[in-house]
Image: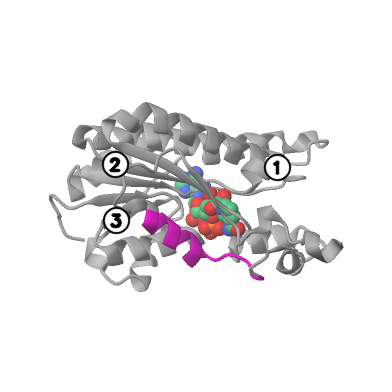
Amino acid sequence: MQMHDNQQIAVVTGAAGDFGREIVRKLLAEGFCVAATDIVEERLKELPKYVEFPEKLGLFYMDVSNSESIQKTSEEIAMVFGDSIVLLVNNAGIFERTPILLQEYHDTVKKIIDINLLGSYYSTSIFSKFMIRKRYGRIINIASLAGTWGAAFGSAYAASKAGMIAASKSWARELGSFGVRVNAIAPGVCKTQMLEHTEKHNSFSAEKILLDLVPVGRCGSAEDVAELVMFLATCKTDYLNGEVITLDGGLNIGTVEITQLS
Ligand SMILES: NC(=O)c1ccc[n+]([C@@H]2O[C@H](COP(=O)([O-])OP(=O)(O)OC[C@H]3O[C@@H](n4cnc5c(N)ncnc54)[C@H](O)[C@@H]3O)[C@@H](O)[C@H]2O)c1
């Protein structure tokens, strides 16, 4: 990794995961210096194999559920790359089942809220200060369609993502006058390890069911999400603020045509 002053720096949380890796790859290709952060260091170390400009990539351990870890990492990133942190992608997240009738899941509920909601809260709080100093910044929160639809047996996950959506809109209001824009992406179901993990606990194939329900006829992918991140990170207008963009192939609008029913 080289020192790069005056370069636009992007911080990606959960960078070792499926979405994270693709987001990092595309940001580097676009010319950003990227601070890729995660708690799974073995998977972080594999990132350079997948990217075009590994010399502009920094790998950092950062636990988003711990604000001290974020503070410490933000200082390390500034030491290595300089302080022009202009982009934060709050992507780290976990999904675990939390059936409401089973009390043994209470610790899991807390863990999900700590990582998904408080994690993006702490990260935004710490990294937005760099952006405010430059009077420029973009924050992109990876929420979920579950945040507006809810999710049976996954209410903690759905609530954490609903919280991210409400927080995004609030941060868009708070930070707007400092040149910082905050938007969220709400992906539907994407073909990733997270989907595989969910399917392991179900007796049905979510993918099979979805293929009939998604108007475009396929699950989403990490590439779809990373493309939209790139759009939000680089689009020329600074008037896009406080939006939640659903990225689900049309799943939320349904597939039943009124004309077919009549
Ligand atoms: N995969 C989907 O279908 C889907 C749909 C909607 C939203 N999302 C959201 O997109 C994001 C990425 O999903 P993915 O499919 O790439 O999942 P993933 O499991 O592949 O990646 C998530 C990453 O977050 C990291 N992480 C977990 N806890 C952390 C912590 N405390 N601190 C820092 N990093 C931590 C993991 O190590 C992992 O690398 C998540 O927020 C998820 O909720 C995913």
- Depth check: give the residue in front, 72 or 78: 78
The image quadrant where one finds the C terminus is: bottom right
Specify few, some or many for label 3: CA neighbours under 10 Å numbering under 14, 14-19, or 20 or more. many
Q: Is residue 221 a member of the stretch shown in magenta? A: yes
Is residue 67 visible in this depiction of the protein?
no
Q: CA distance from mark 1 to mark 2?
A: 30 Å
Q: Residue type at mark 2?
A: Gly
* Residue under pointer 3: 34
Q: Is residue 92 a member of the stretch shown in magenta? A: no
Instruction: Give the residue displayed 25% in from the left and 69% down from the top.
Output: 53
Please report contact status of discs 1 and 2: CB closer than 8 Å, yes or no. no
The image quadrant where one finds the N terminus is: bottom left
Q: Residue type at mark 1?
A: Gly
Specify few, some or many for label 2: CA neighbours under 10 Å numbering under 14, 14-19, or 20 or more. many
Relative vertical location of residue 169 with respect to residue 260 in this rendering, above or below: above
Q: Secondary structure at mark 3?
A: strand
* Residue under pointer 1: 150
Residue 189 got which mark?
A: none
Span colored in magenta: 217-231
Q: CA distance from mark 2 to mark 3?
A: 15 Å
Instruction: Tell me residue 103's x, y (percent).
Output: 78, 33
Foreground label between 3 and 1 = 1
Q: Quadrant of residue 258?
A: bottom right
Q: CA distance from mark 3 to mark 1?
A: 33 Å
* Residue under pointer 2: 137
Instruction: Give the residue displayed 29% in from the left and 41% down from the top.
Output: 137
